[in-house]
Structure formats: structure tokens, C-alpha cells
Amino acid sequence: MRFHALVEVRLRAGIADPQGATLERALPALGFESVEGVRVGKAIRFDVDAFDEAAARAEIDELCRRLLANPVIEEADVSISPEPGSMAAGGRAG
Amino acid sequence: MSGRVGVVVFPGSNCEHDVVEAIEGLGGDAELVWHGARSVAQVDALVLPGGFAHGDYLRPGAIARFSPVMDAVRSFAADGGLVLGVCNGFQVLTEAGMLPGALQKNRHLRFLCTTVSVRIERSRSFISRLARPGTVLRLPINHFEGNYTCEPETLAELRAEERIVARYCDNPNGSIDDIAGITNEAGNVVGLMPHPERAYDALLGSSDGAILLRTMVEPPRGRSRAATAEAGATPGPAGSRLV
């Protein structure tokens, strides 16, 4: 099956995020008075062929651990969704 | 005999010729080593220079760490070979797990290009072998991601094991504990944010970096790679260090 993956990488809690802090300080000047807790990160999208969602998640977790996030300062959230129609096509990696 | 220093060139490195110039200016021999090389034989020391290896894409050093040469760098270091990462090279060494911690964006998101005072600390690193602890050096810095950080336990280890090589006298980038450079447990792998190669001769405004780089040009007697390889071959106490 083919899965769409979205990996959000952000700085861990407690790690200073000067980009987020600067944005947050700028917002009141635009009239956004009630926004707080701004954190800036990265979004990385890609597709994965895997037997099932668990296999896809295991592969993506490994990819995050080895490359996409630096565990000293960052953490990653992974969202996975099956490609519509991918199951019906028989699953290339199955 | 003068030391032969290999200078690793990644796509996007830009300080390799400065390092070659400095090493040769101090009487050593230097050669460039392309990042695709699978061996680093015939050198006494290695420098990972400054720049933007692989464009610094994702994070500085994140891709460089997978360059073929890094396996050779890793085994060279495991054999006791001297490895110095300067600036981007320091970032590569942390991403490769050869040094602990990480280098974040500078405090206030400010790119820094200036000359700073750095105090040499008492440490087990090879790079400060010729410098008395407490010596203050004027060295150029030139970085956006030089804000060193690590877990509190790691910092405690670095302090207890005398692995902090140098501290900024006036912290320019937000680095934890004013850290400008650290070394590994064995003292043979060093990361420095300041650029000693840009201060090896008075003509450049400062020759303060020479005292650091000379440690690679003049390997100490009995600590050459050949000597450590021999020492490693004879049975010794478990956990004995090569350097």
C-alpha cells in the first residue's frame, strides 16, 4: 500500500525558539492580540510504500530518528494516511 | 617530521583552502580529501572545515554525516587519529554522534561575523596541548548556528571529564556554559566554533590560532597513529585510551 506521510519537526519543549518568539512579539502590531505559544518548525511530506500502516509508521519513525529530527533539540510528529484507491490497486509493497 | 593533515571537502565546504594555507604556513603538509573518499590513509590528522556541507539542508551537518568519507573519519578517530571540526565541521561531528550535543541557531537569530576572545580551558583535548589553561585567544567566528546546547547530564559530564576545550569570554551566541569548543572522551576529536585557521598569522590580524593548529603539524612523540596502533595491539587494561 502507498501512504502519504507528513512529518512535523519542531524544537523540543524547553529549547529556546527565537523564530517563534520573534513572530509572537510581532503579532500584536498586526492586531493579533490573543495568539500565544508560537513555535516554528518544519513540515516534511513524502510517500511510502509499505505492507500496512504499522510497517509504514515503523519505517518513518526510523527515518525521523536517523535523519529528519535531531533528538538533542527536536521532536517529530508523524501523520500517515493511506493513498485513496491504493488498497484496491493491490498494494505494491505487499 | 611534519604532520600530514587531511582536509575533508564536502560539497559546500568553503574554508578548506584556508585550512590548507594555515597548515602549510605552519610548516605542515596538507591535502584535500573529497567527501566521497572511502579511506583517509596516510594522514596524521584530519580537519573538517567550515562552510555549508551539502547546503546545510535540513540541519547543518545532517546530510554530511552520511557522506562516504565519514565512515573513514570515524574509524580514523577510533584508532586514535586526531580530528578537528571547525564551525560547520563541528556541526558535522555532533550530527555524526562523534561529539555530544547540538548547535542551534544563535540567540537573537543573529548571524555573527566578528573576532572574539576565547579562553582555553584545562581539558584533555589534543588541540590545546601547547596552550596553557587560561590563555585568552582572539579568534574569528562566522556562524549562524553556533549556539551549543546539550542535556544537563551531558554538560555535567563535559565539565567533570575536562572536555570543555574553550569558552567565550563574552558569550556571543547563547551557547550553554559559554562553550566554544568541546572534545570527546579520548581527547582526540575536537569541535571548535571559532576559526583558528583564519588567525594563524599576524598578517590576518591575529596569529592566536597557530598555537592550536600546531598540535596537528607537530604530532607529539609517541602519540603518532603508528605508535597508538601498536599500543592497541598489545594486551592492556580494558578500557585503556589510545590517546
Image (tube, helix red, strand yellow):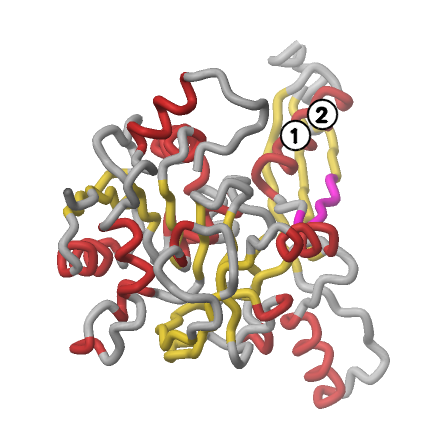
| Magenta extent | A72-78
Tag count: 2
Q: Residues within 10 Å of mark 2 (few under 14, many from 20)?
A: few
Q: Residue at x 23, y 50 (%)?
A: B217
In the rendered structure, the answer to whether residue A11 lies left or right of residue B173 reads: right
Amino acid carrying label 2: it is Ala
- Note whether residue A73 is visible: no
Residue B184 in picture, x, y percent from top left: 52, 45
Q: Please give the label number shown on residue B79.
A: none
Instruction: Assess whether mark 2 and mark 1 are in contact (beta carbons under 8 angstroms).
Output: yes
Q: Residue at x 36, y 36 (%)?
A: B81
Pointer 1 indicates a residue of which chain? A
Q: Quadrant of residue B238?
A: top right
Q: Please give the label number shown on residue A62.
A: 1
Q: Secondary structure at mark 1?
A: helix
Amino acid carrying label 1: it is Glu
Residue B176 in picture, x, y percent from top left: 63, 66
Residue B50 inside the magenta-drawn segment: no
Q: Quadrant of residue B113?
A: bottom left
Q: Which residue is at the front of the view, B126 or A73?
A: B126
| Residue ID for mark 2 | A58
Q: Secondary structure at mark 2?
A: helix
C-alpha separation, residue under disc 1 versus residue under disc 2 = 6 Å
Say yes or no: labels 1 and 2 on the same chain: yes
Q: Which residue is at the front of the view, A13 or A87?
A: A13
Main secondary structure of the magenta stretch: strand
Q: Which residue is at the front of the view, B14 or B47?
A: B47
- Note whether residue B147 is visible: yes
Q: Residue at x 27, y 63 (%)?
A: B197
